[in-house]
Image (cartoon, rainbow, N blue to C red):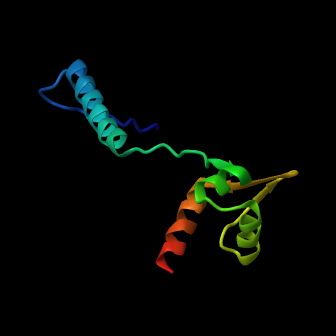
Amino acid sequence: MQESKITQVHGVNPQEFKDSIISDIKAEFDKLSQNFQPVLPPEYLTRQEVAKILKISLVTLSDWNRKGILKPYRLGNLIRYKQSELDQALISINKK
């Protein structure tokens, strides 16, 4: 014998029940969308761009790479720096 699952709501017709559910779901989506921040891909900068931003020479930039002040990323033959990590490096340099 198969058991049937029936939920009965008294005083509400099916359309009103459906509209109530839809409005509640929309309200929840609105709350979520207000706090939603899309994940942005990291922005990579070239050696020349970083040197220009920091107002240093490429030799100094290479020295900072060796000392671990900045973290370069190698993409094939290219060297790139993440903008966010550059900002953090500037903050730590200024604290010293």
Q: Is 39 or 65 nearer to us in this picture?
A: 65
Q: Total label count?
A: 0
Residue for point 88% across, 51% down: 77
Kindly identify the residue that appears in the image at 22 percent across and 28 percent down: 20
Answer with the quarter of the image where residue 67 lies: bottom right
Q: Residue at x 52, y 46 (%)?
A: 39
In this picture, is 84 found above or below 22?
A: below
Question: Residue 54: x percent and y percent?
Answer: 60, 60
Q: Nearer the viewer, residue 87 or 17?
A: 87
Side of 16 relative to 73 (left or right)? left
Closest to the observer: 4 or 43?
43
Picture coordinates of residue 22 (x, y %)?
Answer: 29, 28
Asked if residue 83 is positioned above or below residue 36 in the image, the reply reads below
Q: Is residue 46 visible?
A: no
Picture coordinates of residue 6, whole percent (x, y) = 32, 34
In front: 87, or 25?
87
83 lies left or right of 57? left
Residue 24 at least partly seen: yes
The single residue placed furthest to the right in the displayed view is 77
Q: In this view, which residue lies farthest toward the top? A: 15
Instruction: Where is residue 48? Give x, y as percent.
Output: 71, 51
Picture quadrant where residue 58 is located: bottom right
Which residue is located at x 31 percent, y 34 percent? 25
Residue at far bottom of view: 96
Looking at the image, residue 93 sits to the left or right of residue 5; the answer is right
Residue 69 vertical placement versus 21 (above, below): below
